[in-house]
Amino acid sequence: MAENKTGFERFQTGFLYFWVYAALGWIYEVFLEVVVYRWGFSNRGFLFGPYLPVYGIGALLILGCLRGLSRRPLRVGRVNIMPVVVFAAVVVLTTVVELIASYLLEWTTGGWLWDYTRYTIQWQGRICLSASLRFGVGGMVILYGLQPLLEKGMARLSEKWRQILFTVLFLLFVVDCICRVL
């Protein structure tokens, strides 16, 4: 993102990134459910639309907290170990986000949308090592692969189309949130 953007333009761009990652999170969850576990399709989200806000929030936190770190080298001899450090940080960050999300969902809806009790290394069915490691891999894909591509794509969008896209997606998201609450 350019340094000369207004606060609203940064919010707009951040929301579009949030939405992309929330939608990718929904696709990931549905893929696991349908293809990997063969449970059949269900809307994996708290909201009605095909997106999971926890993935969007997690991705924005990864970018905000770890992007600068991921670009710096940390060498042991000639080997850059920064990716290992970043991976560990992504695992910790996303695990904390998932844990907080489970408590927020339980507080607002009476339960959360996943159950890790059948996993060997888990805590209260809310978090587990297996999912945390997968989120770590996903965070690395975001930092080193997807985000640079998204930024290039965003730079190609005209201001008019970015505003239209933002307005449509933001309104859909707000309406979805309102409908879920009512």
Image (cartoon, rainbow, N blue to C red):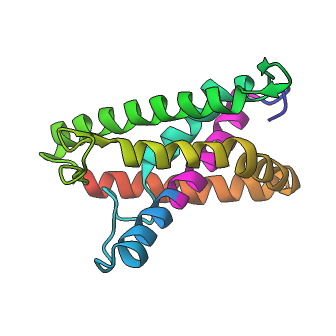
State the residue at coordinates (45%, 71%): 31
Residue at 45 percent of width and 66 percent of height: 50
Quarter in which the N terminus is drawn: top right
Of 19 and 140, nearer the camera is 140
Query: In this picture, is 119 found above or below 75?
Result: below
Residue 98, horizontal then vertical, whole percent: 36, 39
Q: Is residue 18 magenta?
A: yes
Residue 40 vertical placement versus 88 (above, below): below
Provide the residue span drawn in magenta: 6-24
Q: Position of residue 87 (x, y in %)?
A: 59, 34
Q: Quadrant of residue 76?
A: top right
Does residue 104 appear to the left or right of 158 in the view shown? left
Residue 16 in the image: above or below residue 33: above
Which is more toward the observer, 182 or 123?
123
Q: Residue at x 38, y 48 (%)?
A: 130
Image quarter in which the C terminus is found: bottom left
Magenta region, main secondary structure: helix
x, y percent for residue 131: 39, 48
